[in-house]
Image (cartoon, rainbow, N blue to C red):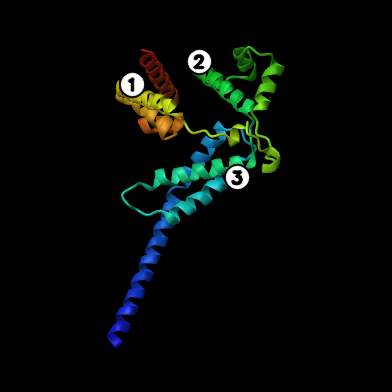
Amino acid sequence: MYQFDQRSAFSRKLDQRSAFSRKLDQHQLIAAHEALVRRIAWHVHSRMSTSIEIEDLIQIGQIALVEAAWVFEDRGLAFAPYASTRIRGAMIDALRRAARVGRAGMANRRYLAGIRARLEQQYMRSPSDAEMADAAGLTASAYHAMAASTHAVPLESIEDSYSDHDIWFADLADSAETAIEKAQLRDSLIAALERLDGREALVLQLYFVKELNLDEIGETLGVGAARICQIKKAALDKMRTMMAD
């Protein structure tokens, strides 16, 4: 009986030490990835029209980071990609709860985003409203009206807002043909990426996959942000030519 009690006490001590070690590891994970939260928050905030302040997004991301650290189990997978998915998902869920954009607004957002991306590559800076309006073939008032339609509006109750024709309630699953086209496009993109030189491919990966800005990529590669912008533009031009071929 005494020997059994000794073993039980020893087992409890091991469990306590193990729990303390896990808790310490979790706090280390949280501290090491706080910058990741801010980076994702700025990335989400810059790409989505939202009334949620950046600090609120950061707070949402920090909560998601803590939750991710407490449930993460090291099974050979890195923590950062797992946490990034949880953090970005929490932010997007918060945006969806806070606002809704109509079908026309979503179409206008995609249209203006395409024009903005083209002008940014052309001018190597953010275009002005006048330049955006001119590129879209709109008057200043018409452009501002279109831009305003892309802004989020408060959610109504589900009973008041539900519609069979509303995109937010539509089945967005890809058809078989669309899935095949996306797979073919993905294969073409991979083949084109493999034909880029090492630095160009690395810049595109850091920008679009790792979501680093031009200054951060420049620090990584030891060059200025302007040079990184040139490399990115050259790589994208090559990708477009190869995809067109």
- Residue 207 visible in the snapshot: yes
Horizontal side of 73 relative to 41 (left or right) equals left
Q: Position of residue 196 (x, y in %)?
A: 32, 21
Residue corresponding to mark 2: 122
- Between 84 and 198, the one lying in front of the other is 84
x 41%, y 26%: residue: 182
Q: Kindly identify the amino acid type of the residue bearing the numbered disc 3.
A: Asp
Can you tell which of label 1 and label 3 is closer to the viewer?
1
Which picture quadrant has residue 152?
A: top right
Q: Is residue 22 above or below residue 106?
A: below
| Label 3 packing within 10 angstroms: few (<14), some (14-19), many (20+) | few
Query: For numbered disc 3, what is the local secondary structure?
Result: helix
Q: Which numbered disc, 3 or 2, marks the residue that appears first in the sequence?
A: 3
x 42%, y 30%: residue: 207
Residue corresponding to mark 3: 56
Q: How many marks?
A: 3
Which picture quadrant has residue 175?
A: top left
Query: For numbered disc 1, what is the local secondary structure?
Result: helix
Residue corresponding to mark 1: 192
Q: Position of residue 38 (x, y in %)?
A: 51, 42
Horizontal side of 87 relative to 234 (left or right) equals right
- Between 4 and 236, the one lying in front of the other is 4
Q: Which numbered disc, 1 or 3, marks the residue that appears first in the sequence?
A: 3
Q: Which numbered disc, 1 or 2, marks the residue that appears first in the sequence?
A: 2
Q: CA distance from mark 1 to mark 2?
A: 22 Å
Query: Quick one: which residue is furthest to the bottom in this view?
Result: 1
Q: Position of residue 70 (x, y in %)?
A: 44, 56
x 36%, y 24%: residue: 184
Q: Kindly identify the amino acid type of the residue bearing the numbered disc 2.
A: Gln
Q: CA distance from mark 1 to mark 3?
A: 39 Å
